[in-house]
Image: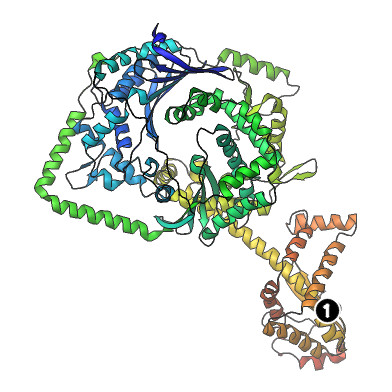
Amino acid sequence: MFKDNYELLVSTKLNHLVVEKWRSKRTGLTVYNVKAPNPLVHCQIFLATETHSHDGCPHTLEHLIFLGSEDYPYKGFLDLIASKSFANGTNAWTSTDHTSYTLSTAGSEGFLQALPIFMDHILYPTITDEAFHTEVHHIDGEGKDAGVVYSEMQARENERFQVIDFESTKYLFKNDSGYKYETGGRLEDLRSLNVETVRKYHRDYYRPENTGVFIAGNVDAEQIFEALESVEQKIMRKRGDSYTPLERPWQTESILFDKSITKEIFFKSEDDTKGDVHITFKSANANDHTTTTAMEILLEYLMDGSSAPIMQQMIDIKDAYAASVSNYIYHYKTNLANCDLDKIRQVRTKMMEVLTDLVENKSIDLEKIRTQIQLSKLKFLSQLETDLEELLSQPFITDLLYFDSPQDLVDSLNTELYEVLAAKDQSYWIDLLKTYFIDQPFVEIIGLPSLEEGDRLTKEDNDRTQAQIEQLGQEKLAELAKELDRCQAVNTVQVDQHLFVQSILNDKPLVNDDQHKKINEYIQSKCSEKVPFDMLFSNGDTAFVSAILMLNTYELPDELRGYLPLYADLMELSPVVVNGVEIDHESMDLMYKQVFFSNAITIENYEKAVALIHDILYNVKFVKERIDIVANQLLDEIPEEMDNAQKMLNSLRSYFEVDHTRSNEAANNVRRQQVFLEDVIARLEDDATAQSEFASLMFLCTYFDQFEGPFFKGLRGAGICYSFSLDIDREKCVLQFNCIKAANIESALKEAKKIVLDIVESGTFRKDWVQTARSTLVFDIAKKEKDITSAMIQQLWSVYIRKWPIEGYKLLLDILADVTEEDLLVSMKYFRQLFDDNYSYVGIVSDPTKVESLKQLFDTDKLKVVDIESKFV
């Protein structure tokens, strides 16, 4: 049996699955096998790749692997054979510490045929001069630098995230750590890289004992070993007696920063209003599984969802510090994106204030932590069914690169760890936060947008290219053009058709259509009433329920399509009213976490989930404050999207390819959303300004006509009139001064005007009158709803006439509490206009005997005398 050539190092149960780790006794190749009853077979082949330069050897090698191998020396052959094996090609990526190659096939037969061919490409690539020339870097006949890898990094090197992240790595490590280098390659280094350096790198790192093969699907270990036998035989045949064992990569301990560092750097951007902040802390050792898992949960608690502390105090607020926050478990890096420039240098300080407050006041919410633990566990179990290869690839990669013993892998997959963490008390989480954030230094990189940076980079590259062209000369450029043609011809040699293999798909699909039809018919027949919408039920071997709700927007009026992104976010970020009780958005966020995870539901929570979906659809309360905050978050994310060439291209295509008045995608492209959201926010601000001004005007009216106030003392106290009032008619948008039973109307008007202008000129109010006015106004507002009838009338006026929220005047209490003397001074302009004939009119009802004397007070051109008995008939 082929299995006899492998040692079983790990065999552990993971829910309903068995995880196995095998190592070849002959070559050291490591195989991770998870047999799962899935119609697809997923394979990931990964290697530890360490570099100490920016020349991009790990990345260039990843590309060259696909350009032919010793046994199959044809460019593109690997992808062709994958397609014939019921796969949609292959894929690969280069990370900081490893390189991965992936293949997914429908059924096991095709996979088993493709696996040894894939391994031959990885372990024995041709790496020809011609392949390097076209795939990595060359100078073309026009004197310009080109190549697939070079073009990829040219597009990536100056992206905002890459610029800030690369700057950060300069300060994280004090020694020559491999983590500080750009494995993709920097342009300057790629231009000087040669093919022999890449070949040497392959000899050093692409060895079987440095390679892990992870298979997830309906495949037995014995079948895998049989498919790998030809690879094993070739390894032993080519290894020879002079073989030198590999020194395991990543064994030199990195010496991390020991003091806090803050640096600023510019990135090119078409918008110069938003920047990013990256803050990095030291992380726990990868072998410390308990702490590593606990920190993942703690970071989610701190940053995920509107109920998270950092979201509550920094993101999901008016005048937010940033539009979004994300974290990376690698060195506990926190990225706050799209920060307003006037606050960007306060971001880290504010974040540390939030974290310090949690520690000093011992205010970490243990219930929310435990909810997050349960959520993390359910996500893990759900991914075992839906995304097995994604879930387990990182533990297996970490095992190959860093773990010291088989038990480390077992511990990293132990779901009982969630129960262990759920039993921890509050002090455990506070100590974690204090140890890894409060008591540690940090590296902070502030990324600032620059319109000029793009011009500078373009000019710099153009000048370099022009100098290169002049140095090469026309004769050399002609030679380079011919060399490129030659290399392309060599790389496109036709594949030998005899190398192709045949594959048969015998595996059955995971779902049974006949069974689904029976389930749908049964459920529909059991409904007491006809279901008012289409429903589709599917059944599979799963411990979870997945529910997808689709809303048809075909008939949506075109002018409303722009609201869809905002509406979709507000559905989950707004309060909900259930049975007359309002549940705030933060409590709703916690409820979502307790019920939903990765779009899945436990069977026990099915009814709760249906109720929540109903509430989201029908009971959401759209509050202006939440609309404003969410709209600003969406708007703040747009500059970063506009810097993304692919997203802008997609927007351009959708705009021209479809009817952009009816298509949601086209109607909501980045630029149109920017204009739309700016308009929404402006309208909200106009309304907010109106509310604030209305509150200030109410305050001023009360200030002037309160008992023993300025008008009381200046008018009634002086015996000029019997009574007076200042009123605002909100519906008519009118401010009016009334002077009743005045012995001398001229004196009354002059004195009232003088009182107002004295305040305008002095810019001051009496503190005691401000205080008493505020108290009086609170009483006046409360009086408007003194009984049920009064309250009902106010609600009718608020909702149907004033278009206010149902709370009406009650909302003004919150606004009035924040009114300042500066606000009052701004609103004094209306009172100044009130006593200015150019802005206001004066109506006087007088005894006929006094009409002639009153005429002397006014400009005769503006004065109109009317007879009440005939005027209004």
Task: Sort mark 1 into few (<14), some (14-19) or many (20+) by Cα contacts within 10 Å.
Answer: few
Quadrant position of the N terminus in the picture: top left
Residue corresponding to mark 1: 870
Kindly indicate the quadrant of the structure image that contains residue 532.
top right
Quadrant, the C terminus:
bottom right
Q: Which residue is drawn at 76% across and 94% down?
A: 856
- Residue 247: image x %, image y %? 34, 29
Q: Which residue lies furthest to the left in this view?
A: 475
Left or right of residue 199, residue 263 in this image: right
- Indicate left or right for 91 with 462 as reference: right
Q: Say left or right for 90 vs 432.
A: left
Q: Position of residue 107 (x, y in %)?
A: 44, 15
Which residue is at the front of the view, 406 or 484?
406
The x, y position of residue 126, in whole percent, is 23, 26
Percent position of residue 115, x then y: 36, 18
Three-letter amino acid code of the residue under disc 1: Ser
Identify the coloring. rainbow
Q: Is residue 860 above or below residue 779?
A: below
